Image (spheres, helix red, strand yellow):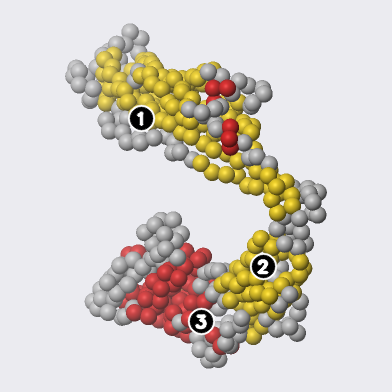
Amino acid sequence: MQNSVSGFWSQLMGRWGKSVVLAAAGAGMFAASVSAATVSYSADRPVSRTSWADTLVVPRFDGALGTLTKVTVSFSGQNFTRTSVESFASQANSVLSGAVVTLTLQTPGLGSLQIAPRVEFFNQFTEYDGLNDYAGTSGIMNPTLEASANGARVLVPGVDDVSSFVGLGDVTFSVNAAGSTILQGSAEGGTFRFLRVTEAGAGVVVTYEYDEPVQDEPVLGALGDRVWLDYNSDGVQDANEPGLKGWTVTLLQDDVVIGSQQTGDDGIYLFTDLPLGTYTVRVTPKSGYTQTFDLDGLLTAHVATAFLDLGETRLDVDFGYDCFSARIPTGTGCTPGFWSNRNGQALIRPSDLAVLTALKLVDNAGNDVDMMDPTTLNFGGSGPASLDEGKAVLRVLLRNSNAVNMAAQLSRHLAAFQLNVRWGFISGSRTFRLNGSTVTAQELIVLANATLNEASYTPSGHPLRSYQSAIKDILDAANNAARR
């Protein structure tokens, strides 16, 4: 038997959220803050043959971190068992075999914490077939099965004894695994030959919850929100309207520049650590964009003024801009060319790339084209690391695909068609005629994806080339006719 269990728990250290409580300190510019935090430690006993006894060691809680409020001890274990049975009964026989592994964790103050993962096999045999070989009709060699169990105990200072968990050094747990056999047959007077191999492992995680020391800190606020592309120029941020990345936003107070930054992926910006006062936010517009909204009106173009109270966070200083006429000239369609140029690329969101990655899109050589990790549908892993890198992969597909491999041409038009449906340029319920049948836009996407899964390289003479070409032509015509 081969098992690979490197450990049940990995060491985890992290903090929970921080809450700020206002206090009357001085002139009201400072407050007392209390932070609830956690720190966790783990140890494990690797899988090995039962029975065994061992120790697990984790650090104690360091009182210098703060005031301990809770100790949680989590215990987990696994049982890996296989059995072999030969029934010598003179009649048909049902046999239950297996093992229970009793895992016990102990340390001063905790007492005993016990779990018992159980593995069972139920086999039905004929009368003894005359061969003592754990095979045939009266015997079997069962495969290894795994069972797991876990338990936990919570200790509260002042209620429970937590002295063994506090201070410098380590807390030591004793842990043992004891395996017991399960063997039972249905035939009266039945006898068996039986073998059992059992292995077990265990792990412990100790989590300390505590309050950090109280300290005085300034009460500061934040100011910001979003610069976005207002498609319909109505001054309202609709769900399909993306942020404008890379725009310069400057913060001023009394005409003095306090800071400047570039908007992020979704047009987000935020200035932090700001005291009480009145601030001016100024956006540097880009050529071809018309302003449609800012907080205090458009009479002061690209500039908004906002008052920030003590410790306040204001996320309403938004700026809207429309540039659709410049991005989609009259008479052009939402083609692969549109989606590969800067105007179409500006619309593409991570969710669009996730949908495209889930499709079977291929290049001229028939290789998969993924704008994200195809397993997680997120950036990183085996896919591009960022939105910009994912867009770059899409641009290559849209610009470089040729008709030598019809599957690549179909992929190119399918990608543009899918984006047009997602953005509402083509209705998902719109119908098309394909080989004498009526299909909706959504059904057409499914059919295109299915044939690409069936054949990703369709040069001249391939039996699916004409079918893929027919779908490609429909998608091409729909993309050219698409309008916002």
Label 3 sits on what residue type? Asn
Position of residue 417 measured from the top left corner of the image (x, y, whole percent) = 47, 75
Q: Quadrant of the N terminus?
A: top left
Give percent across and percent down for residue 394: 41, 73
Q: Note whether 212 is above or below 121 in the view shown.
A: below
Q: Residue 343's mark? A: 3
The tag earlier along the polypeptide, 3 or 2, is 2
Please state which of residues 336 and 73 is positioned toward the viewer in this rendering: 73
Mark 1 or mark 3, which is nearer to you? 1
Residue identified by numbered label 1: 46
Going by the numbered disc 2, the residue's amino acid type is: Gly
- Alpha carbon separation for disc pair 2 and 1: 51 Å
Task: Give the alpha-carbon distance from disc 1 to disc 3, as whole Å.
Answer: 56 Å
State whether residue 307 appears in this view.
Answer: yes
In the rendered structure, which amino acid carries the disc numbered 1? Pro
The residue mark sitting in front, 3 or 2, is 2
Q: Is residue 10 left or right of residue 482?
A: left
Neighbours of disc 1 within 10 Å: few (<14), some (14-19), many (20+) = some
Task: Pick whichever of labels 1 and 3 is earlier in the sequence.
Answer: 1
Determine the secondary structure under disc 1. Answer: strand
Under circle 2, the secondary element is strand
Q: Which residue is pictured at 65% across the width and 43% down the height?
A: 35
Q: Nearer the viewer, mark 2 or mark 1?
A: 2
The quadrant the C terminus occupies is: bottom right
Is 124 placed above or below 69 here?
A: above
Residue designated by label 2: 224
